[in-house]
Amino acid sequence: MKVGVPTEIKTDEYRVSLTPAGARELVEQGHEVLVQGGAGNGSAIWDRDYEAQGARILPDAESVFAEAEMVLGVKEPQPEEVAMLRPEHVLFTYLHLAPAPELTQGLADAGATCIAYETVEDAQGRLPLLAPMSEVAGKIATQAGAFMLEKPLGGRGVLLGGVPGVAAANVMVIGGVVVGFNAAAIAIGMEADVFVFDRNIDRLRELDVAFAGRASTVYSSVLAVEEMLPRADLVIGAVLVHGARAPYVIRREQLKLMKERAVIVDVSIDQGGCFETSRATTHSDPTYEVEGITHYCVANMPGAVPITSTYALTNATLPFVLALADHGVGGALARHPGLRPGVNVAGGRVTHAAVAEGTGHEFTPLDEVLEPQVASN
Ligand SMILES: NC(=O)c1ccc[n+]([C@@H]2O[C@H](COP(=O)([O-])OP(=O)(O)OC[C@H]3O[C@@H](n4cnc5c(N)ncnc54)[C@H](O)[C@@H]3O)[C@@H](O)[C@H]2O)c1
């Protein structure tokens, strides 16, 4: 198969969807790897590094999309990329379609088979291709929040860990699995007082053991959230309902309960945001203020640390990339059932129920779209 790696063009995105190690694995299996010149530069991976592993460098995105059968990405395709997609393409990237009806329509119109990293599952129903970036984003969330709490940056002017004789700041983390665990772990490391909220009691039990008393766990009822907000200096939103638009865990009215110049970091912004007042921001202009509360809502947080994120992401995606290249979509789905929920759009239809619900599209079961393809593999 011809596997294409275009340069990411989303604002402040420096990751790349394949490393030279990944290119080598594909080439070893007899596939062709086509990398847009300069695609790896943001992650300090140079064209010559890809060429040394057998990849071919192409001059621009047009030539990559024209030649490739499978296009690998990091962030969701931008409009000029959607315009280059064809029905015979397999697109494998983060899509986050539930809050993005226009992009969903664009992908359906293109007719390509669009597989979203964030809805691919493992045997336990976890999200193996979201997890590495959630680990990165969770750690950044606390770092960024601590920074934004500094007075010159518009924050309250409080140090997360306090000092002897002066209390630490209160960090409230809503959602306690991958993003939430990592955000809380860094906040604990910075010696803040940490409170992790979730609605899954078994998860709260696990966190209680993992943090060994260094963080409090709280069942995330509306009342519990409202009781915590007046005390919180930093609130990190880290909830997810697989594939769906993020639920609101803080409404505009509830911001009034918070201290002036407290900071909220909405990591769930890529699924539409879990605070009612959130709107996506960029690394170049990461914050804005509503009701006296600083909002940090960067939709591609791991893009800020590409040298970490590119390797973490491609370590996780490579087995699935190889399966798709070796066996085609039908064969790969048969061998890796967890890829099935990854297929969000195919043959012009929306094939993921939560994406269909979030975007107002009709849901079509995957088998109805891919049956002939599966049968032929
Ligand atoms: N902004 C970024 O750059 C970036 C990067 C990576 C991940 N993310 C996003 O971060 C979010 C969290 O990802 P994750 O991997 O940690 O998800 P996860 O599935 O590991 O954890 C989500 C948790 O949210 C909990 N939850 C759901 N609804 C809730 C509610 N109403 N109240 C309290 N808890 C609730 C679930 O019980 C679950 O424990 C996702 O939207 C993901 O796409 C964003």
Image (spheres, helix red, strand yellow):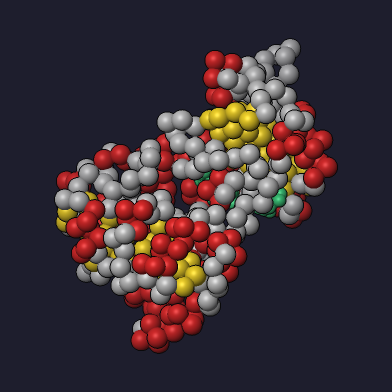
Q: How many marks?
A: 0
Q: Is residue 148 above or below residue 3?
A: above
Is residue 50 shown left or right of residue 10?
left
Is residue 2 shown left or right of residue 301?
left
Instruction: Quarter of the image for the N terminus: give it.
Output: bottom left
State which quadrant residue 250 falls in: top right
Residue 206 seen in the figure: no
Please give the name of the residue rendered at 16% of the width and 46% of the height, measured from the top-left corner: 48
State which quadrant residue 252 falls in: top right
State which quadrant residue 295 falls in: top right
Q: Is residue 329 above or below residue 309?
A: below
| Residue nearer the viewer, 89 or 16 | 89
Please give the name of the residue rendered at 55% of the width and 29% of the height, measured from the top-left corner: 288
Q: Position of residue 265 (x, y in %)?
A: 59, 36
Q: Position of residue 124 (x, y in %)?
A: 59, 65
Q: Is residue 125 above or below residue 16?
A: below
Q: Position of residue 371 (x, y in %)?
A: 44, 84
Residue 89 seen in the figure: yes
| Residue nearer the viewer, 105 or 280 | 105
Instruction: Quarter of the image for the C terminus: give it.
Output: bottom left
As drawn, which residue projects farthest toward the top? 165
Q: Position of residue 254 (x, y in %)?
A: 75, 36
Please give the name of the residue rendered at 53% of the width and 76% of the height, measured from the top-left corner: 364
| Residue nearer the viewer, 94 or 331 | 94
Please give the name of the residue rendered at 67% of the width and 15% of the height, measured from the top-left corner: 163
